[in-house]
Image: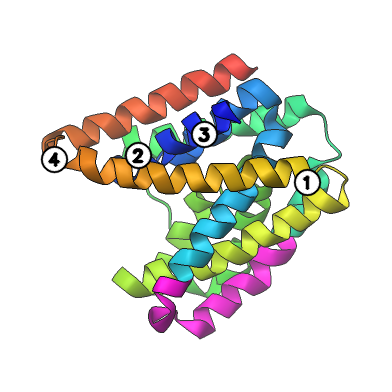
């Protein structure tokens, strides 16, 4: 529980300051201690709670037609991904975590951009759900997918949170159906949720001490640390 508290608070603080990377470090850090599947399962409840809260805050800005098209693909993708994750060797899941870390590094270091056509939102969402359940990296696909529909600002945040909440609920269902989600994992997931919220508050305080020019360097540092953690897990 102490590990989850520390990593969760660190994840919240990093995401608040740098805008990304906290969830990746949380998953990879937990995978080094508990293995990739348990790490993915623990992050499920925390991310579910966070996205439900965010979706509620931005409920008036959720673009429902887009949201439901996203959910139509993301839920079966996440459910199937969760079931598959419980039945494949841990080494394959670890390799997927490495691939995620490599993609995240490429995005930050080389300003890599990818955007599917708006008409492909449902199949792209299915891929995002599957990737989230098997490596936690579905955001690399979900973000560009939603942006391709023309959503901006609060609509993007609210619609993304709405869809992500369904993704995490579906992958938790998949892990549970595969016999890899129990009361202990749920408890640790809720601890992670509380720690992330605490880290968010800590990050808000740190933002006043960190100059804006240092944020891009922090992003690079985070993804490089994540890549090192992913490779060490092999």
The quadrant the N terminus occupies is top right
Of callouts 2 and 1, the N-terminal one: 2
Q: Quadrant of residue 169 in the image?
A: bottom right
Residue located beneath label 4 in the image: 212
Of callouts 3 and 2, the N-terminal one: 3
**Residue 71 seen by the camera:** yes
Establish if 47 lies above or below 25.
below
Residue located beneath label 3 in the image: 5
Neighbourhood count class around disc 3 (C-alpha, 10 Å): few under 14, some 14–19, many 20 upward? some
Of callouts 4 and 2, the N-terminal one: 2
- Mark 4 or mark 3: which is in front? 3
- Tell me the SS state at disc 1: helix
- Tell me the SS state at disc 3: helix
Q: Which mark is residue 183?
A: 1
- Mark 1 or mark 4: which is in front? 1
Q: Position of residue 183 (x, y in %)?
A: 78, 46
Establish if 86 lies above or below 164.
above
Residue at the location (63% across, 27% down)?
A: 31
Q: Quadrant of residue 218 in the image?
A: top left
Residue at the location (74% across, 29% down)?
A: 92
Extent of the magenta region? 56-77
- Tell me the SS state at disc 2: helix
Q: Which mark is residue 136?
A: none
Residue located beneath label 2 in the image: 13
- How many marks on residues? 4
The residues bearing labels 4 and 3 have C-alpha atoms spaced at a distance of 27 Å
The residues bearing labels 3 and 2 have C-alpha atoms spaced at a distance of 12 Å
């Amino acid at each position: 529980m102490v590990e989850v508290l520390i990593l969760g608070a660190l994840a919240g603080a990093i995401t608040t300051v740098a805008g990304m990377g906290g969830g990746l470090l949380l998953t990879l850090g937990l995978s080094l201690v508990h293995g990739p599947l348990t790490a993915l399962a623990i992050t499920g409840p925390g991310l579910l709670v966070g996205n439900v809260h965010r979706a509620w805050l931005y409920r008036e800005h959720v673009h429902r037609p887009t949201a439901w098209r996203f959910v139509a693909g993301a839920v079966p993708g996440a459910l199937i991904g969760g079931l598959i994750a419980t039945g494949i060797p841990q080494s394959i899941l670890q390799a997927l975590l490495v691939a995620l870390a490599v993609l995240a590094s490429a995005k930050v270091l080389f300003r890599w951009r990818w955007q599917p056509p708006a008409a492909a939102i449902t199949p792209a969402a299915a891929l995002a759900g599957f990737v989230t359940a098997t490596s936690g990296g579905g955001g690399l696909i979900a973000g560009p997918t939603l942006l391709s529909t023309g959503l901006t600002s609060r609509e993007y945040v609210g619609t993304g949170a709405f869809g992500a909440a369904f993704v995490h609920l579906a992958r938790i269902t998949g892990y549970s159906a595969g016999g890899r989600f129990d009361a202990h994992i749920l408890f640790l997931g809720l601890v992670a949720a509380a720690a992330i919220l605490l880290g968010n508050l800590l990050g808000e305080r740190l933002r006043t001490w960190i100059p804006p020019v240092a944020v891009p360097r922090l992003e690079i540092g985070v993804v490089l640390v994540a890549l090192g953690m992913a490779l060490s897990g092999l």
